[in-house]
Amino acid sequence: MQRLKIDHIVRCMEITSYIQIAAQLIVALGILNVWLIRSRQATIYRGGSAQSLKSEFAAYGLPGAVFYLVGVLKVTAALALVVGIFTPVLIAPAASIMLILMLGAIAMHFKVHDAAQKYLPASIVLVLSLLILIL
């Protein structure tokens, strides 16, 4: 009976680990896709009427330097989430940075009175970042 309980606990820990890794990869690959591959493309999620990531920051009234700072932070945090699969010490700082940046993204969408659908990607990344931190 005792062995069965231990096996169950170990199995739950394994499942939790897989969920955390999946969340890390979803966040990391999503951010890397937006910032490195699709930054110059229009999407239905861009803030205001922006047609690119850089013009989205302008639509929020943010200076160009903020675009580059946020880009460096997001790409670095995304890479740290991937590396964190093998070096767990990187996970909490990277997920925390991502969580803070997503709060900022949601605030910017709110600032320009975007439709609810435009909040969706930032909201999903926010929830996943919180999940990563909890697990």
Image: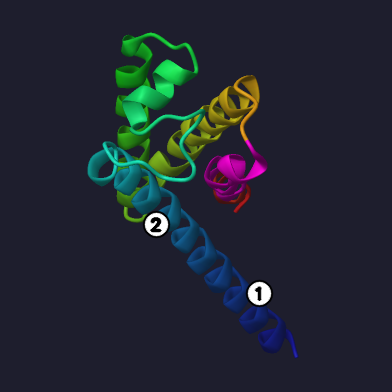
**Callout 1 secondary element:** helix
Q: Position of residue 38 (x, y in %)?
A: 28, 44
Chain-order first, disc 1 or disc 2: 1
Residue 9: mark in rendering: 1
User: Is residue 87 among what the camera can see?
Assistant: no
Horizontal side of 98 relative to 124 (left or right) equals left
Q: Residues within 10 Å of mark 1 (few under 14, many from 20)?
A: few
Q: Nearer the viewer, residue 99 or 48?
A: 48
Q: Amino acid at mark 2?
A: Leu
Question: Image point 46% across, 33% down: which residue?
Answer: 93
- The residue mark sitting in front, 1 or 2, is 2
Q: Is residue 64 magenta?
A: no
Distance CA(mark 1)–CA(mark 2): 24 Å
Disc sitting over residue 25 in the figure: 2
Q: Which residues are magenta?
A: 115-128
Q: Residue at x 46, y 19 (%)?
A: 59
Rendering coords of residue 44 (x, y %): 47, 45
